[in-house]
Image (spheres, rainbow, N blue to C red):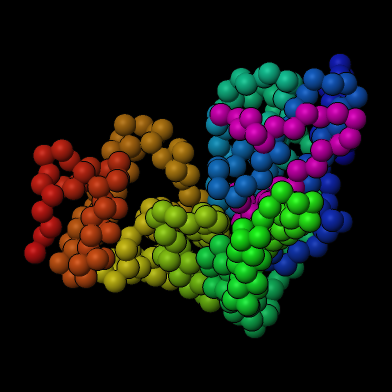
Amino acid sequence: MPAEADTNSGATVRLEAHNGQTHFKIGDPVILDLVFTSRTPGYVVNIDTTPYPSVSDLVELAPEDGWVRSHVSFRGNSLNGNALANLGSSPICVPILLNRTITFNEPGQYEVTLTTERLRTSGDWTPTSLERCEPCRTTNAVGIELSARDESEEGALVKSLSRVLEETNGSMSAGELAPKQKEEITREIEDQERTADSSEASRKRSENLSRKLGELASNRMAAIQKQEDARREAAVRLAYLAGDDAVRAKVHFIGDEREVGEGNPIGPIMRDGLPSSRNKQLQLTLLEGAWRDPRRVPNSELHNALRQAKELTHKGWVTDEGMLWTGTAEERQMALDQYQAEINEIIATLPLRSESNRAETIDFLKKLAVPNQFNKQQSTNTTPD
């Protein structure tokens, strides 16, 4: 099918296979490329592909069975100016991870089209919605094939990916110098400070030392970025696997996500993969256990995952956080009642927690938007016995 073009400007968006790949196994990240071109200036493309904001690209597949839509496409978000690229004479390619809104349940051949709002005229900040999207364009169709995955293969993959995630936790350690190297650098700095004078030789030594320190800093930043990329890639590959081993791993990493200070969080990626899990009841049981565990400090990612796991046990899709409070008054009240019940479950475990754990848990409760006895103004600062 031909790509859609703007007859006035020649602005075009087409869908292509990412790196030529059109065959996948159930549980693989399924990525296709949106390719934008234009014969005239005045267009920008939203190139944001970070795995944390809600998805705005609408994925359509034929046939209509063998897959489910796990998340709605959430339009109406403000555009990130830092993620806008001017569309010039060279095409702009944006990889799209279909699994973020689509779950493949059955092997088969599928035709994929995308409707996207990423292509805009410069200065066009018009809000869009699911019902009305003036800038939206629909692509050509691309055929892909999904095949079954062997259980033993998936089990080995879960182990290897989990090992990568454990080893890359705390990425700031990447690229650190060995103790001997640190001693040598410290000695060079001290020698330079001690012998510095106005001579040409001293000036050159200082320049060489500055260049060396700059290269070390650059190398370390590159090592940190490489480790973060490997961690994110491993998280995406694990998130959409369907078996019980993958369920246990996903819940483990969601539960271990820190509420603050996590520079490269993978909890949102794991949460996106909850609909891919075959055993929805096991998933819910594990998340309920993690939420109520007095040895674990609760976090918002675990709370969100618990809510979505409850939805998945009785329907095939989840409500994104951005749309949770936009329903009817009755739906909003039901969501609030559920949240408050879950917060009460945490409050009931406070006497079972260690002193430090209890302090962190109360701090978590104080920061919640859902009312509870710790974030009300009239609440005292006393801790339960």
To which quarter of the image does residue 325 belong?
A: top left
User: Who is closer to the viewer here, 323 or 371?
Assistant: 371
**Residue in view at x 43 percent, y 66 percent:** 256
Residue lying at the far top of the rendered structure? 8
Query: What residue sits 11% from the left and 60% below the top?
Result: 384
* Percent coordinates x, y for residue 102 in the rendering: 62, 52
Instruction: Confirm whether the magenta stretch covers residue 243.
Output: no
Asked whether, in this view, residue 217 is left or right of residue 24, the answer is left
First to last magenta residue range: 78-107
Image: 240 above or below 8: below
> The C terminus appears in which quarter of the rendering?
bottom left
Q: Is residue 11 visible?
A: yes
| Residue 251 in view here | no
List x then y, in percent, for residue 75.
Answer: 57, 32
- At a point 64% along the width and 65% down the height, the residue shown is 191
Q: Residue at x 48, y 49 (%)?
A: 318
**Left or right of 29 in this view: 238:** left
Q: Determine the image quadrant of residue 23.
A: bottom right
Q: Which of the pair 146/120 is nearer the observer?
A: 120
Depicted 269 relative to depicted 335: above or below: below
